[in-house]
Amino acid sequence: MKDNRLILDRYKDYEDRVLVNELLEYVKACSSGYALRHTDFLDPRQQKIAEDILGMHKSIYYAFFGGITDSERAVCVICDENYKLTEEDIPITILSITWNKSSRKLSHRDFLGSILGCGIKREKVGDIIFDECRAYIACMSDISKYLLYNLSKVGSVAVSVSETETAQKTEEKVKIITSTVASLRLDSLIATGYGVSRAKAAETVKSGKVKVNWEDTSGSSKEMKQGDVISIRGRGRVVLEEVSGTTKKDRIKIMIKKYL
């Protein structure tokens, strides 16, 4: 118990502490018997927390499953080291959604908004991907039937929902932006990646709409590094793909990948 308190004290954010406490309870349950536990969907930052916590305990086995190849969000399944994990133990269902293509184009934001509008919590939903004729949604199996029978519209567009076995993520559309910046400050990279002024970028950060590596941030002056992911609510995300030295005027050469 004392060790658990010491672990919890490393995390100051309330939601992080809730996750850590949940993981520690799962470790206790799985270590004391032939048991299996799982989280809801975790974003990459939360997955790193799970790895840090679960990696301390050698008597358990854990693995991440997203339901979709190369998924970003994933469920962590935890069990005793002697437990034989099967496909039936993975609590994820894939939903296939089709609609009349003569209707307006539907986006990731449209689907997520409609699902949350059904009263579903964000952590119950994994990746949402598209191919040429349909969308696929990874969700927790305990809410799949609810969506199957209650998700009849996305925005104003009528949709048809069914279960499917697999979904393959198609190549995402990206725009490569090469530029030079005076510094690697967050507001500078937002200005470059999203095509806005530094003042507008700073205002957006202050509004609380920005996350860096899936973590809320409110500091425009935060220094970024290669590989960092910046996302703005409703505007998508960009990745600082490369930092490649400086120009003769000491400006920093960068390459940003913007997901469209």
Image: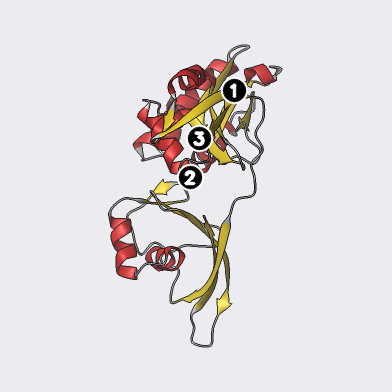
Pointer 2 residue: 105
Between the C-alphas of marks 1 and 2, the distance is: 22 Å
Q: CA distance from mark 1 to mark 3?
A: 22 Å
Secondary element under disc 1, as helix, strand or loop, is strand
Look at the picture and state if 70 lies above or below 256: above
How many angstroms separate mark 3 from mark 2 (CA)?
Answer: 28 Å
Query: Which of the two residues, 128 or 16, is positioned nearer the viewer here?
Result: 128
Q: Is residue 184 above or below residue 251?
A: above
Secondary-structure class at tag 3: strand
Q: Residue at x 64, y 49 (%)?
A: 171
Figure check: 16 above or below 239: above
Discs 3, 2 touching: Cβ within 8 Å:
no
- Residue designated by label 1: 163
Dots 1, 3 in contact, CB < 8 A: no
- The number of callouts visible is 3
Residue that mark 3 sits on: 42
- In the picture, residue 187 is in which quadrant? bottom left
